[in-house]
């Protein structure tokens, strides 16, 4: 089944392991995991954000395998679950951002269309959550008042009593809060109870969203999705693998043709090693350079070239695709910019040059997967003046493209 409002197939989710017991490196007790979840929830973090922190900083890939319950169920048991489901909250946040954009750009027809799609998903999700009783039947999304939810996340603290009055099906007026002047705000439970002298304040945890100072190059994104490295540089308590064993795993993966970032993902997800430098004292790329297995060109430049070649192959079949032509211009401008930077930092020779034209000969030549991986990482024997790169689809043994990167 495909996605609702795009051409994607929706198959990019990670598969849970069949084994339900905790991994061997997880030594944290279930009570300690619950305490960490409680502390993060009181800071205003959502369940998915808590899961990312536990995975990347504490080496707990699956909370249910340790505690027997998922994060949201633990939060509900302690009265710290969000009042509205997380996916609905982020859809409302996106709709508010689009409306704010349309206030400044009234003729942006594409944003108007995207707003219609987002709000239709909000109404559809709201009907589903009312049917499954995760939202009260009187709950209603109103675009005029939803902007008060945008700057912060609301999370009920234990000071909220169950006997307080309910407004619009919720325990507090969710869509009538002004943006707070500070991190923690005390609000009345309801407008009627606020005027009485015996009103009980409700503590609401507020988490401001960070603002990015620098955006992406060719898109509207802010480029703030990278994970922050922990300040602590010593190995984590659950990492029992020796440095020599980690280096051996890196060598084996590199000989299979994996790039440094792919090796890091394998070590993190399969072996519980979140940061190689904290174990070995060196980053993955430096280890590969010491053993002569580093890629000939930097990884980000390689994948940009791979993307450019794929777009050119697409344009051979679809010559009138103007959007792909525009994307090709953007990708190749990034290639030239990166190449200038790597020449300046001496990671590429000063005579290195990117040539976009693909060679016509050898496209139908059958080469084994092992040979392709060797040629991607090492210079071609007998061709000291050039580097040849083969890129293929995983289900074919015939290279889909062949390109020369000249050293003049």
Image (cartoon, grey):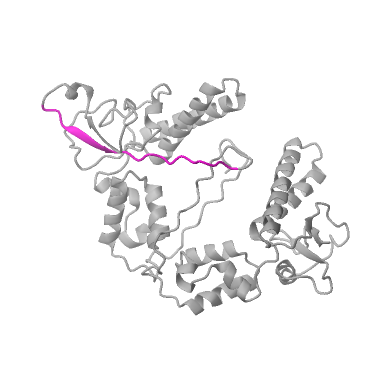
Q: Is residue 151 magenta?
A: no
Looking at the image, residue 224 lies above or below residue 260: above
State the image coordinates of residue 343 (x, y, percent, origin top left).
71, 58
Left of 219 or right of it: where is 62? left
Query: Residue at the location (31% across, 27% down)?
Result: 177
When asked about the image quadrant of residue 136, the answer is top left
Left of 122 or right of it: where is 295? right
State the image coordinates of residue 167 (x, y, percent, origin top left).
26, 26
Looking at the image, residue 298 lies above or below residue 311: below
Secondary structure mostly seen in magenta is loop
State the image coordinates of residue 265 (x, y, percent, origin top left).
53, 62
Nearer-the-camera pick, 150 or 129:
150
- Could you tell me if residue 128 is visible in this image? yes
Query: Residue at the location (37% across, 66% down)?
Result: 22
Query: Residue at the location (72% across, 54% down)?
Result: 305
Left of 367 or right of it: where is 131? left
Nearer-the-camera pick, 15 or 330:
330
State the image coordinates of residue 243 (x, y, percent, origin top left).
48, 77
When asked about the image quadrant of residue 30, the answer is bottom left
Q: Is residue 204 magenta?
A: yes
Magenta-drawn segment: 198-216
Query: Residue at the location (41% across, 21% down)?
Result: 144
- Could you tell me if residue 302 is visible in this image? no
Specify the farthest residue to the front.
Answer: 344
- Where the C terminus falls, by quadrant? bottom right
- Where the N terminus falls, by quadrant? top right
When asked about the image quadrant of residue 84, the answer is top left
């Amino acid at each position: 089944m495909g996605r609702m409002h795009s051409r994607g197939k929706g198959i990019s989710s990670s598969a849970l392991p069949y084994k339900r017991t905790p991994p061997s490196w997880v030594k944290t007790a279930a009570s300690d995991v619950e305490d960490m979840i409680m502390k993060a929830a009181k800071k205003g973090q959502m369940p998915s954000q808590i899961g990312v922190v536990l995975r990347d900083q504490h080496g707990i890939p699956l909370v249910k395998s340790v505690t027997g319950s998922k994060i949201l169920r633990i939060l509900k048991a302690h009265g710290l679950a969000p009042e509205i489901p997380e996916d609905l909250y982020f859809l409302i946040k996106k709709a508010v951002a689009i409306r704010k954009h349309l206030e400044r750009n009234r003729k942006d027809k594409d944003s108007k269309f995207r707003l219609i799609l987002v709000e239709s998903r909000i109404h559809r999700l709201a009907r589903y959550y009312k049917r499954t009783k995760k939202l009260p039947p009187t709950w209603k999304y109103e675009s005029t008042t939803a902007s008060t939810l945008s700057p912060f996340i609301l999370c009920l603290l234990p000071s909220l009593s169950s006997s307080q009055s309910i407004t619009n099906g919720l325990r507090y007026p969710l869509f009538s809060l002004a943006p707070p002047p500070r991190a923690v705000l005390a609000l009345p439970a309801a407008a009627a109870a606020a005027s009485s002298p015996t009103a009980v304040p409700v503590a609401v945890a507020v988490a401001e969203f960070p603002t990015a100072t620098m955006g992406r190059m060719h898109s509207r994104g802010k480029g703030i999705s990278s994970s922050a490295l922990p300040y602590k540089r010593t190995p984590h308590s659950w990492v029992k693998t020796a440095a020599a064993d980690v280096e051996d795993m890196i060598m084996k993966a590199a000989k299979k043709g994996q790039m440094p970032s792919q090796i890091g993902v394998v070590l993190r997800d399969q072996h519980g090693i979140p940061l190689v430098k904290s174990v070995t004292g060196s980053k993955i790329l430096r280890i590969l350079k010491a053993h002569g297995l580093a890629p000939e060109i930097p990884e980000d430049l390689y994948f940009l070239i791979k993307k450019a070649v794929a777009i050119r192959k697409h344009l051979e079949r679809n010559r009138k695709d103007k959007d792909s032509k525009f994307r090709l211009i953007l990708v190749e401008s990034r290639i030239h910019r990166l190449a200038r930077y790597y020449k300046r930092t001496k990671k590429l020779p000063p005579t290195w040059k990117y040539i976009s034209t693909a060679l016509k000969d050898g496209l139908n030549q059958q080469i084994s997967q092992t040979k392709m991986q060797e040629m991607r990482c090492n210079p071609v024997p007998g061709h000291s003046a050039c580097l040849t790169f083969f890129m293929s689809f995983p289900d074919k043994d015939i290279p889909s493209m062949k390109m020369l990167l000249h050293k003049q």
